[in-house]
Image (cartoon, rainbow, N blue to C red):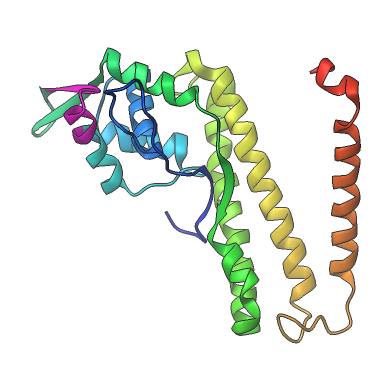
């Protein structure tokens, strides 16, 4: 996947489903969950992962391809050979134990955090050139634009019922809302950061411009308003 390596994800962690159940990473569960939707070949798994996880849990195809064999060794999937267009291919099917493992993982608390490689570049920008900082901002902007461009037909397919799994449209749709909001927010921020920081003389010298202060004040006010709203005792009851 091209771009600055932005991803929203849950930390890779293990689960234990009973005393003798195997330990699974989040990536393994992600693949196992796809097989919980329907049986797939290795190629179909990578294609489905590209549609489903690309912007939130990106993994190389080689990493995805190796997961089914590992899951089979743990008794969580079975495999069968079938004829393909040019050669035989392997189709993987989830087992009852595999479904139990996915359900057990879903029952564990979500350990959410934002894993964003460009943030490290931004934090350390004063140790590099100002041009490098601007290049990072452009890469973030372009990554978001790519996601918005690629995501629109996916969202439209969900809306008009032509997505690969129309029976999952409501769940897919809400996930698409999250990804869309994330990409639109990232693009909006990158544009604002470029507009402000391109006039700076260095990553730490704002050349007398106070635009960043106003942007930060606005975010503080929004955060306080949100916390005040959530502090309303009746808010949780309404939800």
The foreground one among 32 and 113 is 113
Quadrant position of the N terminus in the picture:
bottom left
> Looking at the rendering, which quadrant does residue 143 occupy?
bottom right
Q: Which residues are magenta?
A: 69-80
The percent coordinates of residue 46 (x first, y second) are 32, 38
Left/right of residue 219 with respect to residue 168 in the rendered view: right
Which residue is at 17% across, 30% downward? 73
The percent coordinates of residue 79 (x first, y second) are 16, 23
Q: Is residue 97 visible in this depiction of the protein?
A: yes
Quadrant position of the C terminus in the picture:
top right
The percent coordinates of residue 163 (x first, y second) are 47, 23
Q: Residue furthest front?
A: 19
Left/right of residue 231 with respect to residue 107 in the rendered view: right
Left/right of residue 51 with respect to residue 203 in the rendered view: left
The foreground one among 92 and 71 is 71
> Looking at the rendering, which quadrant does residue 175 occupy?
top right
Which residue is at 21% across, 28% downward? 74
Find out whether residue 227 is within the magenta segment: no
Image height of 172 relative to 203, above or below = above
The percent coordinates of residue 65 (x first, y second) are 24, 40
> Looking at the rendering, which quadrant does residue 67 occupy?
top left
Image height of 16 relative to 13, above or below = above
Find out whether residue 70 is within the magenta segment: yes
The number of numbered discs placed on residues in the rendered structure image is 0
Which residue is at 28% across, 29% downward? 22
Which residue is at 29% across, 24% downward? 21
Left/right of residue 221 with respect to residue 143 in the rendered view: right
Q: Is residue 160 visible in this depiction of the protein?
A: no
């Amino acid at each position: 996947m091209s771009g600055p390596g932005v991803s929203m994800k849950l930390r890779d962690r293990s689960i234990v489903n009973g005393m003798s159940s195997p330990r699974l990473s989040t990536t393994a569960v992600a693949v196992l969950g796809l097989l919980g939707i329907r049986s797939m070949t290795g190629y179909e798994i990578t294609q489905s992962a590209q549609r489903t996880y690309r912007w939130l849990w990106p993994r190389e195809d080689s990493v995805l391809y190796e997961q089914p064999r590992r899951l089979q060794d743990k008794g969580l999937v079975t495999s069968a050979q079938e004829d393909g267009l040019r050669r035989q291919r392997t189709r993987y099917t989830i087992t009852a134990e595999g479904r139990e493992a996915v359900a057990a993982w879903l029952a564990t608390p979500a350990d959410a955090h934002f894993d964003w490689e460009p943030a490290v570049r931004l934090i350390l920008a004063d140790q590099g050139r100002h041009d490098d900082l601007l290049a990072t901002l452009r890469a973030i902007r372009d990554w978001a634009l790519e996601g918005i461009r690629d995501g629109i037909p996916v969202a439209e397919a969900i809306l008009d019922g032509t997505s690969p799994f129309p029976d999952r449209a409501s769940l897919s749709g809400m996930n698409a809302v999250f990804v869309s909001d994330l990409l639109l927010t990232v693009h909006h921020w990158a544009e604002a950061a470029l507009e402000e920081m391109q006039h700076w003389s260095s990553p730490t010298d704002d050349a007398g411009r106070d635009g960043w202060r106003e942007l930060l004040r606005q975010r503080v006010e929004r955060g306080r308003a949100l916390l005040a709203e959530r502090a309303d005792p009746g808010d949780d009851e309404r939800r």
